[in-house]
Amino acid sequence: MNADCLFCKIVAGEIPSKLVHESETTFAFRDINPQSRVHVIVVPRAHHEDAAALAEDAQLLADVLKAGAEVARIEGIDQSGYRFVFNTGDDACRTVFHAHLHVLGGEQLAGFGR
């Protein structure tokens, strides 16, 4: 755990969140500023700064993706479609320095990119 990390504090229960799904290695909760009808954040319980760092642990990355698919099923968007997004680096507008997967869906999403 990184004592200064917002998502580490959420996983530890120090900051309240609306839990959607959890596993031994992952924690999924509702985004407080949703960008679609369904917007859930999936984080590894272990602190990794970004998706590039998370990719160094293939099993944990697979666990995060599996949790994202489970969130889509729980939220009822697994058949209609959903989007997974990792933001890494300044140009991607990353604001929290803990690897996290956005699960977006529940409506027709806009195009991707500019």
Image (cartoon, grey):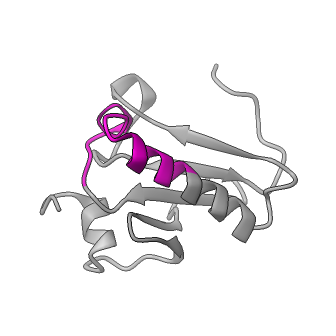
Which quadrant would residue 4 be assigned to in this image? Answer: bottom left
In reply to whether residue 5 is colored magenta, the answer given is: no
- Nearer the observer, 27 or 89: 27
| Residue plotted at (27% across, 58% down) | 46
* Residue 24 image point, x, y percent: 39, 70
Q: Quadrant of the C terminus?
A: top right
Residue at left 41%, top 47%?
59
**Quarter of the image containing the N terminus?**
bottom left
Question: Along the horizontal axis of the image, is 28 left or right of 44?
Answer: right
Query: Can you tell which quarter of the image residue 87 is in?
Result: top left
Q: Residue at x 48, y 57 (%)?
A: 42
Residue 45: give x, y in percent of width and height: 32, 62
**Rendering coords of residue 88 (x, y %):** 38, 32
Along the viewing direction, whichever of 53 and 92 lies nearer the viewer = 53
Q: Is residue 108 above or below residue 15?
A: above
Does residue 107 appear to the left or right of 19 in the view shown? right
Expressed as whole percent of the image width and height from the top left, the position of residue 77 reads 79, 59
**In the rendered structure, which segment of residues is drawn in magenta?**
47-65
Q: Between residue 26 and residue 10, name the one nearer to us.
A: 26
> Which residue, as the protein is rendered here, is positioned at the far top?
114
Main SS class of the magenta portion in the image: helix
**Residue 13 to residue 64: above or below:** below
Residue found farthest to the front: 59
